[in-house]
Amino acid sequence: MASGRSWNWFHRMGSPRWFYETTGRWLPWLWVLTLALMITGLVWGLAFAPQDAKQGNSFRIIYLHVPASFLALAGYYIMAIAGAVGLIWKMKLSYMVMKSAAPIGAALTFLALFTGAVWGKPTWGTYWVWDARITSMLILLFLYLGVLALQYAFHSREAGNKASAILALVGTVNIPIIYKSVDWWYTLHQPATIKLTSAPSMHPDMFQPLLVMILALYSFYALALILFTRAEILQRESKTGWVRELAQQAHPAQSAGVTK
Amino acid sequence: MMGASGGFSAYVRRDLLLAYRRRGEAASPIIFFLLVSTLIPLGVSPDSARLAELAPGIIWVMALLATLLSTESLFASDYQDGSLEQMLITPQLLVLPVLGKVTAHWLVTGLPLTLVSPVIGVMLSLPTAGTVPMMASLALGTACLSLIGAVGAALTVSLRKGGLLLSVLVIPLYMPVIIFGSASVQSAIDGLNWFGPLAVLGAMLSAAIVLCPLAIAGALRLVSNN
Amino acid sequence: MPILWHNVPRKNNQIAEKSLPTESLLTVDELAYERDDCNVFNPINLVVEAGDILQIEGANGAGKTTLMRLLTSALQQTSGSIAYQGQSIAQCRYEYLADILYIGHQSGTKMGLSPAENLRWMSPASTSKADITHALENLGLAGYTDVPCYSLSAGQHRRVALARLATSQAKIWYLDEPFTAIDKQGVKAIEKQLQNHAEQGGAVVLSTHQDLALDTVRKYSIEAHADRGALQ
């Protein structure tokens, strides 16, 4: 069975236990990487990068706003791909990843909207404008909330998983359409009073810390996704032998009482 | 086993007949559409200039809500009486009956909404240049809404209180439709080319006809029997 | 993405190739179904030959309805295989579904249609109007054929669904609790139909708590899996 062997890695990857143990070895490194990138990026961006000529110090919120928006969108695709893998190969682990990606993505989308609003006040004089990018972000938040709401609406976990995976896939097909539509809608209605401070060519001194922060948030996202998925694995596999053993190692006295 | 009933047109005919037998229920989206339009002048202003300005958007939002209201029941009675289960085990591809049911849904809601929209246009002082584009965009747009809404209806069919959840799921997906729908009316009123947005709606409808039945069939198979 | 509309059990594609074509109408091998990581019943092995009437027995909640839905491919098994005339039903899906008839807990009748319209809808296209009237009258629905179904009783609803047995050309009948709300005479009439069908080379798989007044009935008991007891 040659074909069987070549697919072995794939099936092993689908084993929650394998995932738990492997990521357990990665975790310390990922923590160090995330913290190092985050601290470097924040200190560099907030303290050392030059002020913006027009906006002064208020522009510095982009060091959180831009990476959060990136990850919010990328996170939706990660969630949808995990859901698709679950639907096609019936892999339990990938449903767990999908389920974990939803709240993280929703939180990042909210962060992007919130930092956008905070940035908007000094820049445009208002917390909210119906700008194309903000509106798209808001719709993205609604898409995330739909997936989350559907996930928990079912008594059966399996039904919830499959339903939200299908919805995430439908959303994925729609996101480019929504973005293009909203873009087009905005050019149609663009109010003359509000000018976006678009900076096509950012000064390298400003851009480099942004790059570090983008990497930091990617690393943070991976960390959060792994931690959420591990928690989900422990919850779902709590009846299996290896999780009980794990619990016994962690709290020998308590678990002994529980298993009796 | 089920003979011709597995096919597209059999489902269209059956659902139309069922809708005809429950005319009162089938008419409620239209009545809702007319009712809410009387709220607008009461809530905003009877001034025809202000109404005219808002009319394209308002008519589109109301058509969207009226379609949404009727979408919940798309698969509900089939689920309750067991005919959905029978539909799942027909030898034909599931997309055919699914497309048949959605077509019947559009014929019962979207098409009548399109046909009564000029009346509401007059009531809301919609400039006459907008009437034909409104009808054309509603005809294409409500078909998109029926297809997209059916995905949500299929996903929530086994939930007892799926209605509110359904709107949370599908309203974000409706947004491109309402953007181009009301834009084509607005463009016509402003004397601009309104075929462009209408063509985009047509493109969306073609994509929806291809993709939505797959998602609906998948949802019915994987979710409705859990 | 065929997965969206086809129920293809991917793990079991080889099984049909391995097993030689046999005379058995239906072969179920180590069939298992998990709901939320929890086995519903102990693995099921059974063979249905032409002429069989197989009664599925089991306590409430043992998984009889789940088994019926697996056999009709409305649900997809977690493991094991179902073969129709020696071929996995995933591979001969069209032929299989064209050869089975399923009447579930919900009868599938539409309230807004009359019994005649309902039966017309659920019968093969070639069924004549006289056949439909005859089938309904045989089950005691004479005089009700053209009234709307919402004015009928629960037992009469069931009878409308069961009238499909007379018009059907399917080889295997799957009947889930067919006698619910049916009176004694009705039960007798249906039993007779089951017997006729078996004698003509068809097969019947039914779940019921009632004892059938047929001598040829085979019984198969299913048990809830230990997993499910542990959860509660």
Image: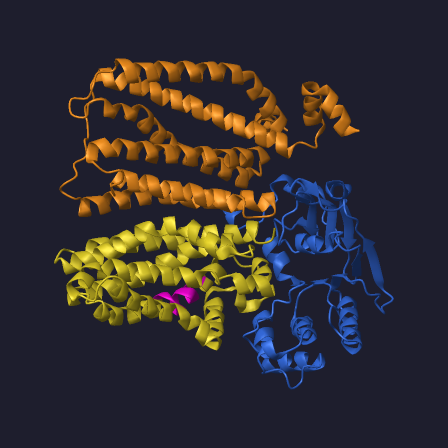
Chain colours: A orange, B yellow, C blue
- Nearest the eye: C134 or C142: C142
- Nearest the eye: A126 or B165: A126
Residue at 56%, 49% in the rendered image: B222
Q: Main secondary structure of the magenta part?
A: helix
A136 relative to A59, above or below: below
C37 relative to B226, above or below: above
> Viewed as shown, does residue A220 lie left or right of B132?
right
Q: Quadrant of the C terminus of chain C?
A: top right
Residue at 53%, 59% in the rendered image: B92
Q: Is residue B33 visible?
A: yes
Q: Quadrant of residue A217?
A: top left
Q: Was residue B197 drawn as part of the magenta stretch in this picture?
A: no
Horizontal and vertical percent position of residue A131: 24, 41
Q: Was residue B105 drawn as part of the magenta stretch in this picture?
A: yes
Q: How many marks?
A: 0
The magenta stretch spans which residues? B102-110
Q: Quadrant of residue A179?
A: top left
Horizontal and vertical percent position of residue C172: 70, 62
Residue at 85%, 69% in the rendered image: C213
B171 relative to A117, above or below: below
Q: Quadrant of residue B189?
A: bottom left
Residue at 73%, 20% in the rendered image: A252
- Nearest the eye: C81 or C85: C81
Horizontal and vertical percent position of residue B63: 33, 62
